[in-house]
Image (tube, grey):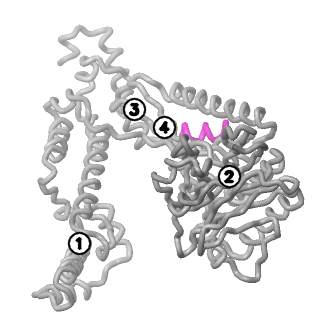
Amino acid sequence: MTSQGFRFLHASDFRLELPVDGLLELPDRCGSAVLDAPRAAVERLFDAAIKEKVDFVVLSGDLLSPRDAGPWGVLFLIEQFERLRAERIPVYWAAGKSDASEAIPAAFRFPDNVRVFSTDHIEETFFEREGVPVARLLGASRGSAALSPRSVEPIEDVDDLYTIGVFNGRLPSEAVKSDSVRYWAMGGTKTREVVSRSPSLAVYAGSTLARNFSETGDYGATLVEVGESGRTTTSLIRTSPLRWSVETLVVREDETEDEILNEARARLKAIRERALESAAYLGRTFDDDVWFVKWRVEADPSVLPALRYGTAAQTILRDLRADFAKSAPIIYAVDIEPVLPEKMPEEMYERQTILGDYLRMIRYYWENPSEEIDLESFMPNEVRDWAALARVKREIANRRRLDGETADLGDLPARLAALEAKEFRPEVAELFDLTSFDPDLDDAGVDEAARAAAIAERRRAALLEAAALGVDLLSETDSPVALLNSGATTKALPKKNRAVAAELRELSRNLDGKELDS
């Protein structure tokens, strides 16, 4: 294999035009960090290339969409490439569909250290050291032709040089069965993934920036080191200034608000310690980093209403933000989401109370998904008319989709005209969406099976919410005495019942059981 060792940085999917999403509100302290995050992540990548003194950089496409990013995006890349040119670090770039040379305006010129692979055919080039070839690179930009890595396999080895395949897109499984290409530098995915280790090492670099809560973990670039024997090792270089984490809290029946807050604080302290340890290891600071945390709370049904519908969750959120959003790295608690249980405790369904009757009704509809739940009879006439309008429009669209423009529509056009003649307030559409299981879908591209699945999911979510709300609103119809006799604690009771329960406990010290029951 290669007689000279070398090292390079493999990255892809800058997607400079895409903003950060998943945040309903943004604190002032985090504003600039979030807005500048796509650019900051790429700057850190090029900082790492210079600091690590790599021999070259390999880019596997989807760096930006020039049309969406605007001129600043291309100018920013040129600026970063110039930094590498000053350090004599070449760049080998296999573009994706959005950033192929055909998409770059002709007015922009990249410095001469940047080699953009063709979209017409697979190109071969060599990285040389003092005029001696050290590594061979085979690559093609995706562009509109979408060339496949399959074409690489017939190409023979050249002087046993270490060969790197640089592509954007899906790597065929048969491509890694041969060791003619030792390292596949792939792009086109958000997350970093090693899809093969032997006989070929194949790596999707993933994005340089994590943009929302679906992108947890480390995001950055892959540092590849090839020894004189050809042995290849890789390590992650984290570049994302934003990190996202979903943490789970389990809240017991007897747990107080302060205890929940202290547990959350301990977890955030552990996150901060890990971040600081990572910074020390990498020899840098994370002053501009932001770690967004969303809390998923699994709570006992007795305390769930206070967290989901009361003020406890917002109080905890406010205190966590005050404690952890003022020092570096910023850790910002975005939300607290109490998770609704699939069912309430069995003993609640057995009670001969209004709550028991209500929960048994909820369970009936849960166990009988085909049983219709009629909510329209409870809606105002205007909302009912809007629902009828939506059904007529959908029926017309379905008939035309099946039979074309000549479909027999019967009296549907007349019904449609009569309903459209009514004047609806702007908020009626939103009110209908909130009170209906029928989701607002684009009928042109949705079949009945997909619609039925969406309706079933909305119905399921509504029944879960209805059960939790019922426990909150109807619990006070249960006798506080019965709750006390069942062994429930004061903390387990809804807040509106706790004062009564405390008084009953005091009375129980002075009255015998018979008098208390009466």
Mark 1 or 4: in front is 1
**Residue type indicated by callout 2:** His
Residue that numbered label 3 is attached to: 299
Q: Considering the numbered disc 3 on the image, is that residue within a helix, a strand or a loop?
A: strand
Q: Is residue 324 left or right of residue 285?
A: left
Label 3 to label 2, Cα distance in Å? 44 Å
Residue where numbered disc 4 is placed: 312
Residue 157 picture location, percent across and down: 63, 54
Sooner in the amino-acid sequence: mark 1 or mark 2: 2
Which structural element holds mark 4? Answer: helix
Dot 1 or dot 3: first in sequence order is 3
Q: Residue 395: say if magenta.
A: no
**Contact (CB < 8 A) between labels 1 and 3?**
no
Question: Amino acid type of disc 1?
Answer: Ala
The residue sitting at 24% across, 69% down in the picture is 447
Q: Name the residue carrying label 2.
A: 10
Quarter occupied by residue 14: bottom right
The span from disc 1 to disc 2 (Cα, nearest Å) is 54 Å
Q: Is disc 3 surrounded by few (<14), some (14 to 19) or many (20+) residues within 10 Å?
A: many
- The amino acid sitting under disc 3 is Ala
**Gap between marks 1 and 4, in whole Å?**
37 Å
Q: Residue at x 65, y 67 (%)?
A: 123
- Characterize the local packing of mark 1: few (<14), some (14-19) or many (20 or more) Cα atoms within 10 angstroms: some
Give the residue at x 16% y 34%. Answer: 353
Q: Quadrant of residue 74?
A: bottom right
